Amino acid sequence: MNTEALKDLLFRLADDDLVIGHRNSEWTGIGPVLEEDIAFASMAQDCVGHAQSYYTLIHELGEADPDRLAFHRSEKDFRSCHLVEQPIGDYAFSLIRHFLYDLAKQVRLEALTQSSYAPLAQLADRIRREHKYARMHATTWVRQLAAGSDEARLRLQSALNEAYPMALGLFESTDFTETLAAEGVQPAESVLQSRWQQLLEQTLAGTGLSLPGDFDAAAYMGGRKGYHSEHLGPMLAEMTEVYALDPEAVW
Amino acid sequence: MYGSLSIIEVDNWGRKVHEEDPQKLAEFEARIERGEKIEPQDWMPFEYRRQLIRMIEQHAHSEIIGALPEGTWITRAPGFKRKLALMAKVQDEVGHAQLLYSAAETLGKPREQMINDLINGKSKYSNVFNYPAVTWADTAVIAWLIDAGAIINQVANAKGSYGPYGRALDRICAEESFHLRYGYDTCVHLATGTPKQRQMLQEALNRWWTPIMHFHGPPDKTSVHTETLMKWQVKMASNDAMRQQFLDMYVPKIWELGLTIPDPNLRKNTETGLWEYTEPDWDEFMRVINGDGPCNAERLAVRRYAEEKGRWVRQALIRPTERYVTPLA
C-alpha cells in the first residue's frame, strides 16, 4: 500500500476535523440559545477527538505524535479545505457550514468503513456511530429554522449561497486521488461528491431552501495542496500560542 | 461557579413577610423545620420566592458569564488533552446555566427576562468573572481554586429547602468536582514544570488571591438580611464559615505545590482553629460589583452581542401563542 497516499488522505481528514472542531468551539458562551452553545461545544469535542484519532494513525505510519502534528506544523503543511477555515460568522453561516460538512463527512465515513486499509476502516466505523448525532443535529435545525420564519429562511438561504461553493473544496482532488481509489482505500473524490450532492438535495427537499446554481468555486480550491484562505494562519497562531511558549514542556 | 452575593438587595417590591397569612406562614416554616422540600406548586411567602429567584438567577448568570474568561482559552489550550478537557469544562458551565435558569423558571420568571435583566445590569453575577484571565495559568487557577470555592458554597446550598434548586445543585456539584480535578492537574503540571511555567502559575495566583478571598462575600458582620434566609434554608452557610472552610482545605495544598500566597498575615491560629488573614479590599469588591471592575463592561458587551445576534433564531423557534412559564403567583 502506498504510504504517501495514505498519509495524504489522513492529513486531509485530520486537519478538516481539527479546524472545524476548533471553529465550532468558538460558539461556547455566545450561541443564540444556551442549548446551541452546548451542542456546538459537544460537536467540537467530537471533531477534535476524531482529528486526534486520525493523527494517531499518521503517527503509527512514522510521523510525529498527535500533539506535535496538530500544534507544531506550519500552515503550508496543513491540508484543510477553505470551508472549515472560515471564521464562525453569524449563526446561519455556522449552522449551514456544519450541515454541509457533516453530510459530506457521513458520505465519506460510509465509504471509509469499506477501506482496504483496515485501521482506517475500523476507525471510520467507530466515528460513524458518534457522528450520527451531529448529522441529526444539523438536519433538525436546518429544517426547523427554515420553517420557523421568513427571516430565518432567508438567512439560511444566503448562508447556503455563500458556503456551498466553499464546500466543493472538500472534494478537491489531489495527486493521490487515483492511487487511493485504485488501491481501494477510498473512492475517487468525484464519486463522493456526487453522493453528497444527492444527499443534500434529498435533505433540502421541502424546506424552501435550494442550492445555488450560479457560482465560481475556483477561489476556494487549493487547501488540499497547502494553499489556504487568509483565515487559517491567524487561527493556527492563536491555537498554538501557549504550546509554542515551550514545545518541549509538559502542559 | 458561584460565590455569595447576599449583601446585594436589588429591589424591594411585593408583599412583606409580616403581610403574609400568619397561619400559612407558620405551616410553611414548620415544613422547613421538619426538613421537607418546598416544591413549585406549594404555597410560599412572597419574600421566599423573590429571594430564591434572585439567588438562582445570579447563580445562572455567573455560569454563563463565567464561561467567557475561560472560553477565550479554549482556542489556545496547549495540546489535545487540555483542549478537549477545557472544551468539556466550559460546556459544563453553560449546561449549569441551563439547569439553573430552568430551576428559576419554576418560580415564575422566564429565562428571556432573566437574561434581559443581566444585560441591562439589573441583576448581578459573581464578582470574580469581572477579572481577566491573562495567561493560561489563570485558567488553571480559576478551574482549581474558584471552582473549589464554588463547590463549598454549592454543596451547602444543595441542602437548602427549595427542591428544584437543590436537585440542580446536586448535579452541578458532581460535575464541578471533575473541574476541580482538571484544574488541580493543570496547576500541578505548571508547578512541577519549567521555571517559566512555575512563574506563570505564581503570577496567576498573585493576581487571583484577592478575587478568591472576595469569593464567598463580605464578612458576616457587614452582611444584611441573612437571618430570615438562614431560617428558611435559602442561605445555608455564612460567608465567613465558607471562607474558613476554603482556607482550611486549600491553603495547605497551595503551599504543597511550593507556591507563595501573597498575604504575609495568613496563618492558622492553633488556639481558635481559625485562619487569620489580611482582609481583602472590600471597597474594591463593592466597586467591582457595582459595575466598575476591569472587565464588567466587556463581559456584558459580549453577552449583549450574543443576545442581539441570536434574536432571530429564538424568534423563529418560539410560537407567540404558547406560554412557556407560569406567571408569578
Image (spheres, rainbow, N blue to C red):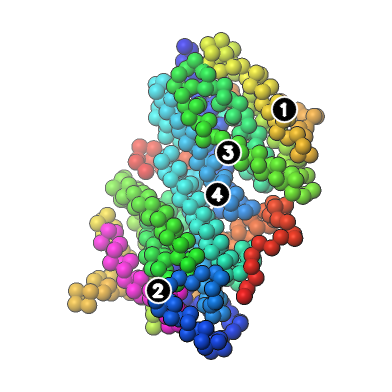
Q: Residue B241 at what x, y percent from top left?
A: 34, 74
The residue carrying mark 4 is A38
- Which mark, by number, is residue A9? none
Tag 3's secondary structure? helix
Tag 1's secondary structure? loop
- Which mark, by number, is residue A217? 1
How far is mark 2 from mark 4, CA to CA?
Answer: 35 Å
Say which of marks 1 and 3 sits in front. 3
Q: Quadrant of the N terminus of chain B?
A: bottom left
Q: Is residue B238 magenta?
A: yes
| Residue found at x 40% / y 55% | B174
User: Which amino acid, by three-letter code, is at mark 4?
Assistant: Ile
Magenta range is B225-254
Residue B320 at least partly seen: yes
Instruction: Reply above or below: B269 against A87.
Output: below
Q: Is residue A220 left or right of residue B130?
A: right
| Residue found at x 51% / y 18% | A115
How far is mark 1 from mark 4, CA to CA?
Answer: 32 Å
User: Which amino acid, by three-letter code, is at mark 2?
Assistant: Gly
Earlier-in-chain disc, 1 versus 4: 4
| Residue found at x 49% / y 72% | B38
